[in-house]
Image: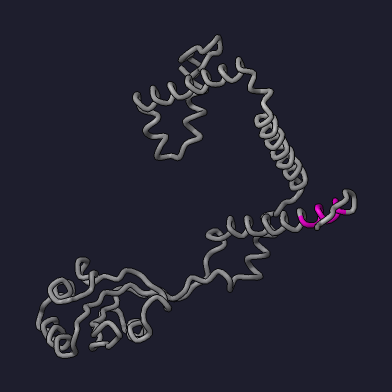
Amino acid sequence: MQNDVLAIVNGVEIIEDDLQNTIKRFPAERQQYLNTENGRKQLLNEIISFELIYNYAKDEQMEKNKSYLAKLEAAKKEILTQEAVAKIMEDVKVTDDEVKDYYNANRSMYKNPESITAKHILLDSIEKANKVLEEIKDGLSFEDAAKKYSSCPSKAQGGSLGRFTRGQMVPEFENAAFQLEIGIISEPVKTQFGYHLIRVEEKEEASIKTFDEVKDAIKRGLLQERQAFKYDQFTKNLKNKYKVEIK
């Protein structure tokens, strides 16, 4: 099936490979539809239309139009420049040992900050906060109390705020939350939003990302840095060869 002829336009065959190569140019979510029966038919019609217009343009001798020739020259210039840049960069390499050495010398750059997972209940007065705290102590679950009393949208998730690091919450809330022990409910904490009852679910200490987590990013960064340096040096040398006037 891979090379089945799907259509013939003015003697030119459109084969399955042509269709599949065209599909691959689209984003993944679009490819899913184009691989259906209806999607394939629609795309094939578009390819046929493209070929028909191409034949029309040839018959009308539009290859001689000034606008076409200008665009063709611009495209040739861009492609040739890209080829030259690729040739200039082909000897720029980064070895695995260099990546490892860079990681070891800059480990502090790859910190996972301290983080916690917490839930809270937001109330508009200290009186309400203390009342809800008493109900929880008497047996009402924290999650049910959040759903019943909290004015924060997180009430729908039982007060869950997910995982966060320092700097993501207002200072009063952050200071209280990061000082709490896991599972302990705070006394009411006042912020600009009201009074919070906070319970920390999990804590994760600050750590250094492993080499495997960052090696690809380091390699990309070093390669880009070296390519930029090579490009800059190469073009500076070319300015000595070709005359440049900036006005």
Residue 198 location, x and y as percent? 26, 80
- Whether residue 194 sits left or right of residue 61 in the image: it is left
Location of the C terminus by quadrant is bottom right
Q: Is residue 48 placed above or below 120 in the rendered structure?
A: above
Q: Is residue 178 placed above or below 54 in the rendered structure?
A: below
Q: Indicate whether residue 236 is drawn in magenta.
A: yes
Residue 52 location, x and y as percent? 51, 18
Q: What stretch is highlighted in magenta?
A: 232-239
Q: Nearer the viewer, residue 103 or 16?
A: 16
Location of the N terminus by quadrant is top left
What secondary structure characterizes most of the magenta part? helix
- Outermost residue toward the right? 241
Q: Name the residue at 40% across, 40% down.
A: 29
Q: Which of 234 and 139 is in front in this view?
A: 234
Residue 41 location, x and y as percent? 38, 22
Q: Is residue 176 placed above or below 225 in the rendered structure?
A: below
Q: Name the residue at 81% across, 57% down.
A: 246
- Whether residue 173 sits left or right of residue 140 in the image: it is right
Q: Nearer the viewer, residue 45 or 131?
A: 45
- Whether residue 192 sits left or right of residue 97 in the image: it is left
Q: Indicate whether residue 237 is drawn in magenta.
A: yes
Q: Name the residue at 32% across, 84% down.
A: 180
Residue 127 location, x and y as percent? 15, 90
Color scheme of the displayed model: one colour
Q: Name the residue at 14% across, 83% down.
A: 132
Indicate the quadrant where residue 146 lies: bottom left
Q: Is residue 139 placed above or below 62 in the rendered structure?
A: below
Q: Nearer the viewer, residue 105 or 25?
A: 25
